[in-house]
Image (spheres, grey):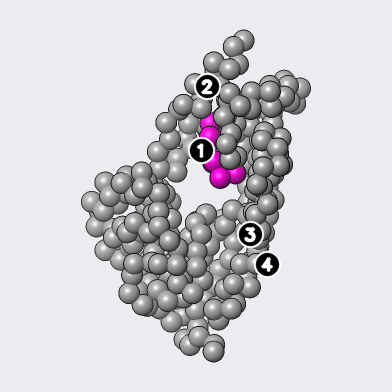
Amino acid sequence: MDWKKIWLKEEQQPFEGWDFEYLNGRWESEPLPWDYRKIVKDHLKPTDFLLDMGTGGGEMLLSFQHPYQQTSATEGYLPNYQLCLKTLSELGINVKFVAEDDQLDFPDQSFDLVMNRHESFDAAEVWRVLKPNGIFITQQVGGSNNRDLARKLIGDENLDFKHDLQENIALLKKESFHILQRQEAYPILKFYDVGALVYFAKIIQWEFPNFSVEDNFAQLLACQQEVDQNGFVSSTEHRFIIVAKKGGMKDE
Protein backbone atom coordinates (compact mmCIF):
# COMPACT_ATOMS: atom_id res chain seq x y z
CA MET A 1 0.00 0.00 0.00
CA ASP A 2 1.28 3.47 -0.90
CA TRP A 3 1.09 5.04 2.56
CA LYS A 4 2.84 8.23 1.52
CA LYS A 5 0.29 8.93 -1.20
CA ILE A 6 -2.59 8.26 1.19
CA TRP A 7 -1.16 10.42 3.96
CA LEU A 8 -0.24 13.29 1.64
CA LYS A 9 -3.88 13.38 0.58
CA GLU A 10 -4.94 13.58 4.25
CA GLU A 11 -2.43 16.37 4.83
CA GLN A 12 -4.08 18.44 2.09
CA GLN A 13 -7.67 18.03 3.27
CA PRO A 14 -9.37 21.42 3.86
CA PHE A 15 -10.46 22.47 7.35
CA GLU A 16 -13.02 25.17 8.22
CA GLY A 17 -14.26 26.60 11.48
CA TRP A 18 -13.39 24.24 14.30
CA ASP A 19 -15.27 21.22 12.98
CA PHE A 20 -13.55 17.81 13.11
CA GLU A 21 -16.51 15.94 11.60
CA TYR A 22 -14.13 14.58 8.94
CA LEU A 23 -12.58 12.37 11.64
CA ASN A 24 -15.85 10.87 12.87
CA GLY A 25 -15.33 7.15 13.47
CA ARG A 26 -11.58 7.46 13.05
CA TRP A 27 -10.67 8.76 16.50
CA GLU A 28 -12.03 8.63 20.02
CA SER A 29 -11.33 10.50 23.23
CA GLU A 30 -12.19 9.48 26.76
CA PRO A 31 -15.01 11.67 28.08
CA LEU A 32 -14.07 14.46 30.44
CA PRO A 33 -15.31 14.19 34.04
CA TRP A 34 -17.26 17.42 33.51
CA ASP A 35 -19.64 18.72 30.83
CA TYR A 36 -18.60 22.20 29.69
CA ARG A 37 -21.85 22.84 27.87
CA LYS A 38 -23.96 21.84 30.88
CA ILE A 39 -21.88 24.02 33.20
CA VAL A 40 -22.43 27.04 30.94
CA LYS A 41 -26.16 26.31 30.70
CA ASP A 42 -26.42 26.01 34.49
CA HIS A 43 -25.01 29.54 34.90
CA LEU A 44 -26.57 31.22 31.84
CA LYS A 45 -29.84 33.09 32.40
CA PRO A 46 -32.13 34.21 29.53
CA THR A 47 -31.57 37.88 30.42
CA ASP A 48 -27.76 37.61 30.48
CA PHE A 49 -25.43 39.39 28.11
CA LEU A 50 -23.07 36.66 26.90
CA LEU A 51 -19.57 36.76 25.40
CA ASP A 52 -17.94 33.75 23.76
CA MET A 53 -14.16 34.22 23.53
CA GLY A 54 -12.51 32.44 20.62
CA THR A 55 -15.77 31.20 19.16
CA GLY A 56 -14.12 29.27 16.30
CA GLY A 57 -16.86 28.69 13.77
CA GLY A 58 -19.55 29.50 16.34
CA GLU A 59 -20.80 25.91 16.58
CA MET A 60 -20.76 25.71 20.38
CA LEU A 61 -22.14 29.22 20.83
CA LEU A 62 -25.13 28.58 18.56
CA SER A 63 -25.96 25.38 20.44
CA PHE A 64 -27.06 27.48 23.45
CA GLN A 65 -29.71 29.31 21.38
CA HIS A 66 -29.18 32.38 23.55
CA PRO A 67 -30.97 35.57 22.39
CA TYR A 68 -28.82 36.85 19.55
CA GLN A 69 -29.09 40.52 20.47
CA GLN A 70 -27.60 39.70 23.89
CA THR A 71 -24.76 37.63 22.45
CA SER A 72 -21.25 38.65 21.39
CA ALA A 73 -18.27 36.65 20.17
CA THR A 74 -14.58 37.17 19.49
CA GLU A 75 -12.32 35.31 17.09
CA GLY A 76 -8.64 35.86 16.35
CA TYR A 77 -8.13 33.48 13.43
CA LEU A 78 -9.01 35.39 10.27
CA PRO A 79 -10.58 32.52 8.25
CA ASN A 80 -12.83 31.67 11.21
CA TYR A 81 -13.69 35.34 11.73
CA GLN A 82 -14.72 35.66 8.09
CA LEU A 83 -16.86 32.54 8.48
CA CYS A 84 -18.50 34.00 11.60
CA LEU A 85 -19.39 37.19 9.75
CA LYS A 86 -21.60 34.98 7.58
CA THR A 87 -22.92 32.53 10.16
CA LEU A 88 -23.21 34.68 13.30
CA SER A 89 -23.40 38.35 12.30
CA GLU A 90 -26.34 37.74 9.98
CA LEU A 91 -28.27 36.44 13.01
CA GLY A 92 -27.60 39.63 14.95
CA ILE A 93 -24.70 38.35 17.05
CA ASN A 94 -21.98 40.96 17.63
CA VAL A 95 -18.72 39.49 16.27
CA LYS A 96 -15.37 41.18 16.87
CA PHE A 97 -11.94 40.29 15.51
CA VAL A 98 -9.62 40.17 18.53
CA ALA A 99 -5.98 39.32 17.94
CA GLU A 100 -4.76 40.07 21.49
CA ASP A 101 -6.53 38.59 24.49
CA ASP A 102 -5.67 41.62 26.65
CA GLN A 103 -7.54 43.95 24.29
CA LEU A 104 -11.20 42.97 24.17
CA ASP A 105 -13.05 45.60 22.15
CA PHE A 106 -16.00 46.01 24.53
CA PRO A 107 -16.90 48.62 27.18
CA ASP A 108 -16.36 47.99 30.89
CA GLN A 109 -18.94 45.77 32.60
CA SER A 110 -20.60 44.63 29.38
CA PHE A 111 -21.33 40.98 30.17
CA ASP A 112 -23.00 38.81 32.77
CA LEU A 113 -21.20 35.69 31.57
CA VAL A 114 -17.99 35.18 29.61
CA MET A 115 -17.44 31.70 28.22
CA ASN A 116 -14.10 30.58 26.89
CA ARG A 117 -13.40 27.15 25.42
CA HIS A 118 -9.79 26.55 24.45
CA GLU A 119 -8.95 30.23 23.99
CA SER A 120 -6.20 32.20 25.72
CA PHE A 121 -7.34 34.94 28.07
CA ASP A 122 -6.08 37.85 30.13
CA ALA A 123 -7.62 37.70 33.61
CA ALA A 124 -7.57 41.48 34.10
CA GLU A 125 -9.33 42.05 30.78
CA VAL A 126 -11.99 39.44 31.54
CA TRP A 127 -12.55 41.18 34.88
CA ARG A 128 -12.94 44.51 33.09
CA VAL A 129 -15.67 43.38 30.67
CA LEU A 130 -17.63 41.41 33.28
CA LYS A 131 -20.39 43.02 35.31
CA PRO A 132 -20.16 42.78 39.12
CA ASN A 133 -20.96 39.19 40.16
CA GLY A 134 -20.46 38.12 36.55
CA ILE A 135 -19.31 34.58 35.78
CA PHE A 136 -16.24 33.47 33.82
CA ILE A 137 -16.20 29.87 32.59
CA THR A 138 -13.11 28.59 30.85
CA GLN A 139 -12.10 25.14 29.65
CA GLN A 140 -8.46 25.14 28.66
CA VAL A 141 -6.12 22.83 26.78
CA GLY A 142 -3.23 22.25 29.17
CA GLY A 143 0.43 22.62 28.35
CA SER A 144 1.12 18.88 28.31
CA ASN A 145 -1.63 18.17 25.78
CA ASN A 146 -0.54 15.51 23.25
CA ARG A 147 3.05 15.94 24.45
CA ASP A 148 3.72 12.19 24.25
CA LEU A 149 2.41 11.96 20.69
CA ALA A 150 4.32 15.07 19.61
CA ARG A 151 7.56 13.57 20.89
CA LYS A 152 6.80 10.42 18.93
CA LEU A 153 6.24 12.38 15.71
CA ILE A 154 8.68 15.29 15.85
CA GLY A 155 10.98 14.66 18.81
CA ASP A 156 11.57 17.18 21.62
CA GLU A 157 11.27 20.30 19.46
CA ASN A 158 10.13 23.28 21.55
CA LEU A 159 7.58 21.32 23.55
CA ASP A 160 8.02 22.94 26.97
CA PHE A 161 4.89 24.98 27.72
CA LYS A 162 3.70 25.67 31.27
CA HIS A 163 -0.08 25.99 31.34
CA ASP A 164 -2.10 24.18 33.98
CA LEU A 165 -4.91 24.51 36.49
CA GLN A 166 -2.80 25.74 39.39
CA GLU A 167 -1.15 28.49 37.34
CA ASN A 168 -4.46 29.80 35.99
CA ILE A 169 -6.15 29.71 39.39
CA ALA A 170 -3.35 31.95 40.67
CA LEU A 171 -3.80 34.39 37.76
CA LEU A 172 -7.54 34.69 38.40
CA LYS A 173 -7.15 35.06 42.16
CA LYS A 174 -4.64 37.83 41.56
CA GLU A 175 -7.46 39.77 39.87
CA SER A 176 -9.78 39.05 42.83
CA PHE A 177 -11.93 36.42 41.15
CA HIS A 178 -13.64 33.94 43.47
CA ILE A 179 -13.15 30.35 42.29
CA LEU A 180 -16.43 28.41 42.23
CA GLN A 181 -15.29 25.24 40.45
CA ARG A 182 -12.00 23.74 39.31
CA GLN A 183 -10.97 20.41 37.83
CA GLU A 184 -8.16 18.92 35.74
CA ALA A 185 -8.06 15.75 33.62
CA TYR A 186 -5.77 13.74 31.34
CA PRO A 187 -8.01 11.73 28.98
CA ILE A 188 -6.62 9.28 26.43
CA LEU A 189 -7.11 10.07 22.73
CA LYS A 190 -7.00 7.22 20.20
CA PHE A 191 -6.47 7.44 16.44
CA TYR A 192 -7.67 4.34 14.60
CA ASP A 193 -5.78 5.11 11.41
CA VAL A 194 -2.62 7.10 10.73
CA GLY A 195 -4.34 9.25 8.12
CA ALA A 196 -6.56 10.66 10.86
CA LEU A 197 -3.45 11.47 12.87
CA VAL A 198 -1.89 13.25 9.88
CA TYR A 199 -5.02 15.37 9.36
CA PHE A 200 -5.08 16.28 13.06
CA ALA A 201 -1.36 17.06 13.40
CA LYS A 202 -1.38 19.32 10.34
CA ILE A 203 -4.23 21.38 11.82
CA ILE A 204 -2.86 21.60 15.38
CA GLN A 205 0.43 23.08 14.21
CA TRP A 206 1.29 24.65 17.57
CA GLU A 207 1.44 21.17 19.15
CA PHE A 208 3.22 19.57 16.20
CA PRO A 209 5.51 22.35 14.89
CA ASN A 210 7.03 21.76 11.45
CA PHE A 211 5.22 18.44 11.07
CA SER A 212 4.78 17.15 7.52
CA VAL A 213 4.31 13.78 5.87
CA GLU A 214 7.51 14.23 3.89
CA ASP A 215 9.70 15.14 6.88
CA ASN A 216 8.15 12.72 9.37
CA PHE A 217 7.40 9.76 7.14
CA ALA A 218 9.59 7.35 9.13
CA GLN A 219 7.78 8.26 12.35
CA LEU A 220 4.42 7.81 10.63
CA LEU A 221 5.45 4.34 9.49
CA ALA A 222 6.25 3.52 13.12
CA CYS A 223 2.77 4.74 14.06
CA GLN A 224 1.32 2.50 11.34
CA GLN A 225 3.04 -0.45 12.99
CA GLU A 226 1.31 0.49 16.25
CA VAL A 227 -2.06 0.56 14.48
CA ASP A 228 -1.36 -2.83 12.92
CA GLN A 229 -0.45 -4.30 16.32
CA ASN A 230 -2.87 -2.53 18.67
CA GLY A 231 -5.60 -1.12 16.45
CA PHE A 232 -4.79 2.48 17.35
CA VAL A 233 -2.17 5.10 18.19
CA SER A 234 -2.81 6.81 21.52
CA SER A 235 -2.05 10.22 22.97
CA THR A 236 -2.59 11.85 26.36
CA GLU A 237 -4.70 14.99 26.37
CA HIS A 238 -4.65 17.67 29.09
CA ARG A 239 -7.75 19.67 30.02
CA PHE A 240 -8.85 21.82 32.92
CA ILE A 241 -11.92 23.87 33.71
CA ILE A 242 -12.45 26.87 35.97
CA VAL A 243 -15.65 28.65 36.95
CA ALA A 244 -14.89 32.01 38.57
CA LYS A 245 -17.05 34.85 39.86
CA LYS A 246 -16.28 38.54 39.79
CA GLY A 247 -16.96 40.31 43.08
CA GLY A 248 -18.15 43.89 43.31
CA MET A 249 -14.74 45.45 43.97
CA LYS A 250 -11.23 44.45 42.99
CA ASP A 251 -8.85 44.00 45.90
CA GLU A 252 -6.06 46.54 45.97
The answer to which of 109 and 11 lies nearer the viewer is 11
- From the image, tell me which residue sits under label 4: 166
> Which corner quadrant of the image does residue 131 belong to?
bottom left
Amino acid type of the residue tagged 1 in the rendering: Ile
Residue 159: x percent and y percent?
Answer: 66, 47
**Which sits earlier in the primary sequence, circle 1 or circle 4?**
4
Badge 3 element: loop
Identify whether 5 is placed above or below 21: above
Residue 195 point in image, percent of width and height:
57, 25
Mark-to-mark CA distance, 3 and 1: 20 Å
Query: Looking at the picture, which amino acid does disc 4 mark?
Result: Gln
Label 3: few (<14), some (14–19) or many (≥20) C-alpha neighbours in 10 Å: some
Q: Tell me, yes or no, whether the highlighted magenta stretch contains residue 158.
A: no
SS for callout 1: helix
Identify the residue at horizontal 71%, vertical 42% (top origin): 156
x, y percent for residue 242 = 58, 66
Q: Position of residue 202 (x, y in %)?
A: 53, 34
Q: Are marks 1 and 4 in contact (CB under 8 Å)?
A: no
Name the quadrant of the C terminus.
Answer: bottom right
Q: Residues within 10 Å of mark 2 (few under 14, many from 20)?
A: some
Q: CA distance from mark 2 to mark 1?
A: 14 Å
Disc 4 or disc 2, which is closer to the eye? 2
Distance from Cα at disc 3 to Cα at disc 4: 9 Å
Q: Is residue 154 above or below residue 90?
A: above
Residue in the foreground of this view, choosing between 71 and 108: 108
Instruction: Give residue 33's quadrant in the image.
Output: bottom right
On the rendered image, what quadrant is the N terminus found in?
Answer: top right
Q: Which residues are magenta?
A: 199-207
The residue sitting at 42% across, 31% down in the picture is 14
The disc, 3 or 1, on the residue closer to the chain's N-terminal end is 3
Q: Residue furthest right?
A: 229
